[in-house]
Image (cartoon, rainbow, N blue to C red):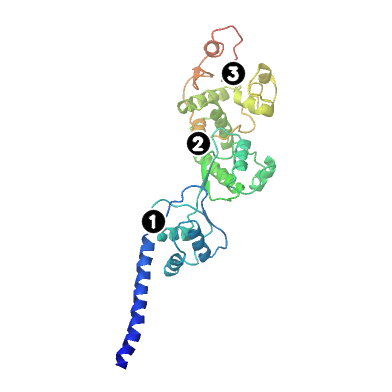
């Protein structure tokens, strides 16, 4: 009798423990199969630098993503990832399981924030966009162009046109200089590649001259099919020693004095960028040119046109002679009225 009682005394606790372990195991299996609530919009889930695995698990519970932290901690230890979780912002799609989430944390698949540098922007517009974007860190406000380029390791370069317009992705708190550095290097790569494949016989001595011309083309038209034609006009004018006579360079030279309206006196005001009174290309680019504009500058369309005028719908009318150009100006600009037509490349 005593032996039976002793057996029961051992068996019952063992059974209880076994049932408890089984229940925990089933609960753990259910935990692994759970589908977490999506976190794909700000505010994102943030793992601070130095946070422990336990703190991360408890925050997931506090935010309503997990029922309790212990299984997540156990999962991390079982999969040998307990010490590999990386700090940063995280998002995840619907259907993400705890195992998927742990893999995301340990791989450092943090949220990437986009910043777009727009084709045709000036360098200062690009800087302003970076300064205004709170996802990035580091102070650019108040720094002049020379200081910015010095910090980027290019103290002798004028910044205009040097940064490739594109959409870039970075984690939160990336230094703004890192964004500029990537755009600077990207422009170097694109310009070098396009220059290597340039057409023969161009009146452009260096890749930088191509960049200057591309920036003018970028500002002159947003019509994809016209870029090569615009380039052809400018290349022919350069080849014949004609002034470019293009409004965007004049506007750039006016700077803050430009009020949105270009007057005859502005065309006669001498600045380094006034291509109505100065020969050749301006001294620097006037905007950030995209790859299409760079390609057009280095692959201008054949033809005889030496002039073009805006038609009012975003496109241009091209002319081979001054007489034809003046007629087009009267039609599209002066509305058949009386006036003195301009004789420039785009007027």
Q: Nearer the viewer, mark 3 or mark 1?
A: 1
Q: Position of residue 141 (x, y in %)?
A: 67, 42
Helix, strand or loop at disc 1?
loop
Question: Taking 183 as reference, is 32 above or below it?
Answer: below
Q: Are marks 3 and 2 in contact (CB under 8 Å)?
A: no
**x then y, percent, for residue 248:** 60, 26
Tag 3 secondary structure: loop
Is 312 on the left-hand or right-hand side of 16?
Answer: right
Quadrant in the picture for residue 272:
top right
SS for callout 2: helix
Q: Within 10 angstroms of label 1, few (less than 14), some, or many (20 or more) residues?
A: some
Viewer-side residue, 86 vs 305: 86
Outermost residue to the bottom? 2
Residue under label 2, please give it.
291
- What residue does disc 1 label? 35
Residues at discs 3 and 1 in contact (Cβ within 8 Å): no
Which comes before the other along the chain, label 3 or label 1?
Answer: 1
Q: Which residue is the site of mark 3?
A: 344
Q: Nearer the viewer, residue 37 or 195?
A: 37
- Tag 1 and tag 2, C-beta contact below 8 Å: no
Give 23 or 340, whichever is nearer the viewer: 23
Q: Give the quarter of the figure containing the N terminus.
A: bottom left
- Disc 3 to disc 2, how far (Cα)? 26 Å
* Dot 3 or dot 2, earlier in sequence: 2
Which residue is most to the front? 1
Where residue 158 appears, x then y in whole percent? 65, 38
Residue 108: percent from left, percent from top: 49, 57
Q: How many marks?
A: 3
Mark earlier in primary sequence (1, 2): 1
């Amino acid at each position: 009798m005593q032996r039976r009682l002793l057996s029961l005394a051992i068996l019952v606790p063992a059974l209880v423990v076994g049932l408890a372990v089984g229940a925990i195991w089933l609960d753990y299996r259910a935990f692994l199969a759970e589908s977490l609530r999506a976190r794909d919009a700000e505010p994102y889930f943030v793992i601070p630098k130095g946070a422990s695995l336990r703190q991360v698990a408890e925050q997931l519970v506090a935010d309503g993503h997990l029922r309790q932290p212990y299984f997540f901690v156990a999962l991390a230890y079982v999969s040998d990832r307990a010490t590999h979780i990386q700090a940063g912002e995280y998002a995840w799609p619907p259907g993400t399981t705890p195992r998927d989430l742990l893999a995301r944390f340990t791989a450092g698949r943090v949220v990437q924030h986009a910043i777009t540098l727009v084709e045709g922007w000036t360098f200062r517009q690009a800087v302003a966009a970076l300064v205004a974007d709170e996802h990035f860190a580091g102070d650019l406000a108040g720094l002049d162009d020379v200081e910015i380029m010095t910090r980027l390791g290019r103290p002798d370069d004028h910044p205009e046109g040097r940064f490739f317009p594109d959409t870039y992705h970075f984690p939160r708190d990336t230094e703004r200089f890192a964004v500029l550095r990537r755009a600077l290097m990207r422009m170097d790569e694109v310009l070098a590649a396009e220059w290597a494949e340039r057409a023969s016989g161009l009146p452009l001595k260096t890749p930088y001259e191509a960049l200057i011309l591309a920036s003018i083309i970028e500002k002159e038209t947003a019509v994809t099919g016209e870029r090569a034609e615009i380039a052809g006009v400018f290349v022919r004018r350069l080849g014949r020693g004609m002034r470019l006579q293009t409004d965007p360079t004049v506007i750039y030279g006016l700077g803050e004095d430009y009020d949105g309206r270009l007057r005859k006196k502005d065309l006669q005001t001498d600045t380094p960028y006034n291509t109505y009174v100065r020969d050749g290309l301006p001294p620097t680019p006037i905007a950030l040119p995209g790859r299409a504009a760079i390609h057009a500058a280095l692959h201008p369309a054949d033809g005889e046109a030496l002039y073009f005028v805006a038609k009012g719908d975003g496109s241009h009318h091209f002319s081979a002679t001054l007489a034809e150009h003046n007629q087009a100006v009267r039609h599209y600009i002066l509305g058949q009225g009386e006036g003195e037509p301009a004789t420039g490349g785009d007027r």
